[in-house]
Amino acid sequence: MPANRPSHLAQAVSAALLLLPALAAAETPAAPVESGEVADVYVRETAKQHTRNYTVPASSAATGMKLTQRETPQSLSVITEKQIADQSLETLQEVLKQVPGVYHSKMGNNATGDSQFAARGGAIDSITVDGKSKFLYESKAIRRATNNLDSALYEEVAVIRGASGLANGGWGEPSGTIALTRKKPHAKAETTIEADIGSWKHYRLMLDANAPLNAAKTLRGRAVFVGDHGGDYLPHTSRHNHTLYGILAYDPAPNTQISAGAEIHTDRNRGSSRFGFLTIAGDEYDGFKPFNADPRKNSSARWAYGRENSAELFASLRHEFGNGWTLKGDYSYIRNKSEMLSGIAGTYEIASDFSSVVSADFDKGRLKEHNFSLKLDGQYPLFGRNHDFAGGISYLNSKDTPSYYTEPEVPVPDLRLFDGNVAKPDIAYRRDGLEHSRNLSVFASTRFKLTGKWSLIAGGRWTDWKYRYITSRSRFVDTKRGKTIFVPYLAATYDFTPNLTAYASYTTVFRPQVRYLSASGDALDPLEGKTYEAGLKGAWFEGRLNAALSVYQNRRDNLGIYAGRLRNGESYYRATDHTKNTGGEISLSGRLTDRWLINTSYARSKTKDSQGRQIKASYPVHLFKLFTSYDLSDRLTLGGNLNWQSAITDALNRPEVSEPDAIAALTQRAYATVDLMAKYRVGKSTTVSLYAENIGNKYYKTMPDIHVYGTPRSYTLSLRHTF
């Protein structure tokens, strides 16, 4: 390296020094609040709305600054604790399915199936927890995170749609970022117990206990325990999940808080499948034809099983300066151990005579992750106005050690007769691999109030990323990749009235594609591009009702496009340039009246290549979602949920398939599902609720080319008591 080139560490330190002027401003009294500025009631009200509403007035998830939803120049949706309870959304996967503009596809059952959430023509593969980035670019970790994490841990689940380089601690994600906020202890002693019973021997018990631990209430604690068993509609399966979350918060001084806690998960399952049967049989020589399978037929061998144990230790220090500035530091350590034996039939190839194989795969891994972040935010006076600022530094070090084994196959003479009873083959250990990623980033953003109506938001994130991997797909070659990048962010807002704001934003996209491998096993070049967004936002009743209208365009090069599957079932991809994803979204969430709550949205998204041809057709172009509830009396609440999506197809990725029946088998037509809810308050602290999902018993594929279906008609009866 040339002697005059600064080291990455020196660059990081220099970037961190940019925060010092803001830190000095934190020690300076703030200017008086101007008339017309948003009152602090928006921020204070946010904590109350988690349990009372289907929206929150303010969020720092998108920009790092404490802005109201109306002031945030990006599409942001929130699923609150109340909506989670009203809809009986028991896992994070179920919660994310309700987010506006987000499409869920799964390849297998709920316990072990690979899950993918997508928005604006791309997969969402970045998650933050309490502001810290996690699971960056790790598809396996995303599956673990969304499949089995229990929703009882969270008071808020937010999704920032569109490029979110300021939010996620990494690059400018073109699709979005999932932002999770865990429950925190408070000063009121309160314990909630909930027992659920549902279809297919589903039993769930949840305990959420909060209490002050000293007379001054400066020491507080909260614990959440969940036991969740059964509930899979596929035969010959079982599932047992346990979650324990505990946190202590201590105030050594009025403006300082120290917190520490742990989150522990254990998951066990049997007979579960990561994938499903293909929907067509044959090849390009004999021709293709549909392979029909019962939606409730299990593609897994009965000897398949999965075990996973994970634990996280975390600590936080927060100090509020006397003038509204806040400094917050976080650290977490995660350790994960997983083991999964899969036996999957008819997932990779089905012959014309409907013969196939069961592919055995033993997946074993150990994950360790260190995560640190430091953030400063507040207001500074300049030119007679108060302006907002947020900045920080974060570091993520993740090391995954997968073990690789042979992948034997067992013949199945006629897949139509497969019932899971198949001999378990011998599986031999090959060797261990390695996936090691390090992510160091510094970000800063500011909202400069040009006038009483105009605001300019500018910022960016500098990131130094390193990735080393030794995997079977790379033929166990020790491969290193890395990049230093700056992602800028620029936006403007204009307040037409105190309730209505227009915005426009711009940022760049740079996304490593180490998980997108070609047929030869080489990683695709990074995704690059630009994204533009404009919209109109409204907020009424101190942020208790929010509405948004947006249009956007994403231009991307080196976009990874699914190109097929290898013999072992792993997908491979090809890169395409000059792609364009365009669309729009409209949403309304919150309280229409004191008794009427709503969360509804419509989204359109379509991706085309440089020739104007549609790509990514396995994602729907149109999505509509509506959940609403109404208090008929002080005791009875009724509600309903309607989800509709347009058709999806895999036929565009299969040019060798020309038979009309086979093309139809690679397509899922447009469909709608309806859920119903009733909740009755027995007393002041006790409620009984019944949630009926997919009341019309609609069968629909979640992926167009495999026989994996959404949940059939099911019921959940819940008893909840707070004391």
Image (cartoon, grey):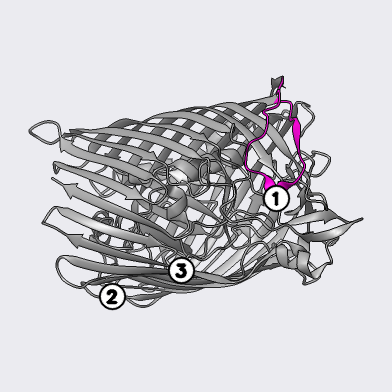
Amino acid residing under circle 3: Gly
The answer to whether residue 31 of the structure is visible from this angle is: no
Disc 1 packing (10 Å; few <14; some 14–19; many ≥20)? some
* Secondary element at image label 3: loop
Disc 3 packing (10 Å; few <14; some 14–19; many ≥20)? few
Give the quadrant of the N terminus. Answer: top right
Residue 696 disc label: 3
Tell me the CA gap for discs 3 and 1.
27 Å
**With 607 as the anchor, is 185 left or right in this view?**
left
Tell me the CA gap for discs 2 and 3.
28 Å
**Residue at 61%, 42% in the rendered image:** 274
The answer to whether residue 140 of the structure is visible from this angle is: yes
Mark 2 or 3 closer to N-term?
2
**With 319 as the anchor, is 329 left or right in this view?**
right
- Which SS type dominates the magenta stretch? loop
Residue 210 disc label: none
Q: Which residues are magenta?
A: 405-428
Amino acid residing under circle 1: Arg
Label 1 sits on residue: 416
Pointer 3 and pointer 1: residues touching (CB < 8 Å)? Answer: no
Tell me the CA gap for discs 2 and 1.
52 Å
**Residue at 59%, 41% in the rendered image:** 273
Q: Comparing marks 2 and 1, which lies closer to the viewer?
A: 1
**Residue at 57%, 36% in the rendered image:** 439
* Secondary element at image label 1: helix
Label 2 sits on residue: 592
Amino acid residing under circle 2: Leu
- Foreground residue among 688 and 326: 688
Residue 145: image location, x then y, percent: 49, 41
